[in-house]
Structures are given as C-alpha cells and as structure tokens.
Image: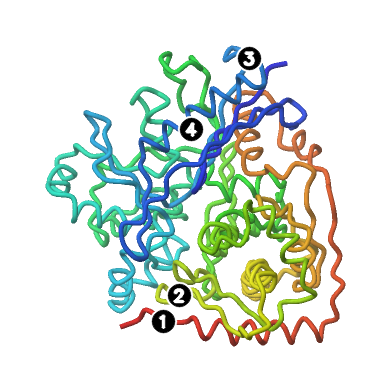
Amino acid sequence: MPFMLALDQGTTSSRAIVFDHDGAIKAVAQKEFTQIFPATGWVEHDPQEIWASQIGVAVEALGRARVAPKEVAAIGITNQRETTIVWDRETGQPIHHAIVWQDRRTADFCERLKKDGAGDTVQAKTGLLIDAYFSASKIRWILDNVPGARARADAGKLAFGTVDTWLVWKLTGHQRHVTDVSNASRTMVFNIHTLNWDDELLRLFEVPASMLPEVKSSSEVYGQVSSSLGIDNVPIAGIAGDQQAALFGQMCRTPGMSKNTYGTGCFLLQNIGTTPTRSRQRLVTTVAWQVGGRSEYALEGSVFIGGAVVQWIRDGLGLIRTAADIEPLAASVADNGGVYLVPAFAGLGAPHWDPYARGTIVGITRGTSAGHLARAALESIAYQVTDLLEAMRADAGIPLKELRVDGGAATNNTLMQFQADLLGVPVVRPAVTETTALGAAYLAGLAVGYWKSVDEVSGQWKIDRRFEPKMPPAAVNALRQRWTKALESARGWERT
C-alpha cells in the first residue's frame, strides 16, 4: 500500500509528514525558518527560504520513512494563509519578501477604506472584515512600494500567490499557477457566493486580475512534481489553508461541529454547512472546502498571538529553554497571582479587531514570579479562544457540545484543562494532533482514490483525552471579568 505526503507550510516552520492508509504517522521532518521584522508591526518571510525549507523536509521525511517517491500516492498541501508573495512570471523570482498575515503595515489604509464605507460591500461579498490581516492590502502595498512593480503588474508580468500557490508553482517547475477555494477566500478579493475573483473588489484594492491564480477545488489533481526535485512525477492533489485543513482533519463535517487549532495563532472554526451565513459578531465567514463539487463554509475567529506567546516567553524573556518547559513553570504556582497578560503584539484579532492594541501585562506586584508570568501567558490563550466562542454562539445559535483541539499547544494539559473550565464544555484532543497535515493528506488521497470516501476517513478519528470542566461558574466569571479589564488596558495603545 502506498503512502501520502503532506506538506504543512506554517508561519514559523515548514513540515512534511508521511501518513499511511490508516492515517497514522510514518515519519515527520520539520525546519524552522527566519522571521524578519523590518519595522514595528511588520513581519516578513523570504519566499525562497520557505521553498528551500519545504522541499528539504519533504525529501527528509520520505528518507526517514524509507519511502521512495514511487510509493507516494499523492501530495497534499496546507499552508499559512493570507501571507502574500508576488513574483516575476518569467524569472520566477519574488520581487519582495513575503508579507506575513501578522503584518500590520497596511492598517491605516484599511481604516481609510472602512471610513469610506467599503466595509459592508467587502463583508457581503467575501465574508471578511476589512483588515490588514488579509491579502488584498498587502498586494497593493507591494505594487505601490516596489519600484516599477505596478507597471509590471499592469503588463501581466507579475504573479500573486498565497503560500500554497507559491509551492505549487515551484513544485511544478513554474507550470501551474493555482490556488484552492479555501485559500482564495482569505484574500479579500474573492466572492464566496460566486466562487470567483470579484472585479469590483479588484478595483477597490487596485489589483490587476492578470496577477491572480486559477481557483480550483480543494481535492483534485493540480499537476505533478517536476522531475528535477527528487520526488518525481508525484501528483499534487489536495490544497487547503491550514485552518480549513484542520477542520477537515478533525472530521467536523456537520453544522455546529467546531475545532480550535493552537498554533502560532489560535483559529476557531465552526462548520456552518453549504450556506455562507454572514457574521454579526465581527467573525468572518470563510470557505471551508470544496470536495466533489460540494462547497462547505465555516465561521472563523482568529487570534493573532496564541502559541507565539510561549515563544516570546522563551526567546524574548528567556524564562524557559524550550516551549515544553512552560507547563511545569506555570504549574509551579497555584494560580496567576492576579497577573493578566494580553498578547496583543500584532494587534487584536476577532472579535475585537483592534490593529492598534499592543501587548500588556497588568496586576504585577513584588510577589509576581516567573511562574505567574508563564501561567498568565498560557491563560491568555484560553481567554482569547473563549471570547471567540461566545461570539460564535451568538452568531450561529448552535450550542457547543464539545471543542475539538489540535496544534502544538494542544499537548499542554494545563492549558487544555483551563480551556475546558472557561468554556464549560468538554475539550477533546484526538489521538493524532497533526490534524492540519492529516486534513491535507485526506483531501489529496480522496482525489486520487487512495481513500474511497469521506466516510472511510471519518472512521479514523479517535480520542486521546477528554478534558471535562471542573471550575465553578462563579470562579470562571470572576476570572473573565478581570481578563476583560486587562483587555481594555491594551486597546488602542498605538492609535495616534
């Protein structure tokens, strides 16, 4: 039986995972790459480094699994979303660093659009709220700030892509310029009702249509890997943005089923079926996936800084040596000691959408220790997710029965228990927490007949641990009131 190869291109690292037919992991390879911070609030990546790290770990994972390319049935791609790359069609060279989804350089432009009244049109067509988070304003910035870029774009010489598009372009030897509906729905120039690029929005953001990739479903053969890359002629057959891939990998297939991924950011998605309901709670409506001609949608709330707060505790403050060290440090104190950390390092995402908020620590006393800071950092992740889920409940009107979780920080038992306590519903961690990569593998495998149906892969989802809420509601309410007060301290800090 052949294997599936999933390429999981994330915000801080590129990973490759080899899965077998039972959805079990055969091998993993991972490589971190450079985070570039040219100015306050700006975040960039080198697209060539993204590519080199991703193809490198793909070959490494196959080697570790002792799997030859001819034994790979297909490749599935999942990726950090909204991150924007523009390159020259002839040379294949990027004309600027990738502008990362966390980047806030276009916040003022987005504020002007909102003041000009564009918000209603944008949300009605795209399901998104105008924000620097999404791709459209990033494309415009590159065209306006790289010398000669706009003229080259108008002449049809430049290509735009999110990271999935860039990887397929490179994997196919510059032959295929494509994306899938889930990634297209994050650009802010894609109409989620017609499932096409929208001319009115392209004019609004001054993006030439010639730059855009062809939009495909999330599960079909897009092309084959170039023979020069060491994984010759393997079909590329699944693409989904990382959060949609995780929703699929968690088998959240019916309306109301929800998952949260604890990665660099936190991403809470709820399946809402085949009708793209508009959010009234400042969440976004997004395409979840399109498989077999059926498009499904999700409500989503995004927290910009989730697990990245642990990186900051490690790298910025030097309080821990590895990310895993935060759990015993946090557990060294009985509670947060009245300390609340709001990790608004890149503004606040849903449901607050405040690009001018900044990181804040409140409640520090002489008795505050490293343990209290570590605990406050972990708890900040759970508080932000709880804020999202409350907004989602108000939007969808569907009571949550459980929250399925994945991502690196989902292995932290202290965090998962606190999350269950705040939500008042069970938090369920699957046996395979690599659900983002698994979702991409499933989408690719379904396209090539490796798995016969979605029902077949649904049976592979199994529980590792279920965290039941234990904290009294009165205690939860007291904690959340203090968190809300801390949030207010962080709001609008950078507004001029």
Is any atom of residue 415 visible in this view?
yes
| Residue at the disc numbered 4 | 54
Sort mark 2 into few (<14), some (14-19) or many (20+) by Cα contacts within 10 Å: many
Task: Name the image quarter holding residue 332.
Answer: bottom right
User: How far is mark 4 from mark 3, CA to CA?
Assistant: 20 Å
Dot 1 lies on which element?
Answer: loop
Which residue type carries mark 3?
Glu
Q: Nearer the viewer, residue 19 or 210?
A: 19
Which residue does the numbered mark 3 point to in the structure image? 71
Q: Is residue 442 left or right of residue 463?
A: left
Of callouts 1 and 4, the N-terminal one: 4
Residues at marks 2 and 1 touching, judged by CB atoms closer than 8 Å: yes
Observer-nearest of 198 and 165: 165
Q: Which residue is mark 2?
A: 358
Q: Residues within 10 Å of mark 3 (few under 14, many from 20)?
A: some
Rounded to the nearest whole Å, what is the CA distance between mark 3 and mark 2? 49 Å
Residue 50, how many percent across, how many down? 42, 38
Q: Are marks 4 and 3 in contact (CB under 8 Å)?
A: no
> Where is the N terminus found, in terms of image quarters?
top right
| Identity, as a three-letter code, of the amino acid under mark 1 | Trp
Which of pointers 3 and 1 indicates the residue nearer the eye?
1
Mark 2 and mark 1 lie on one chain; the one further toward the N terminus is 2
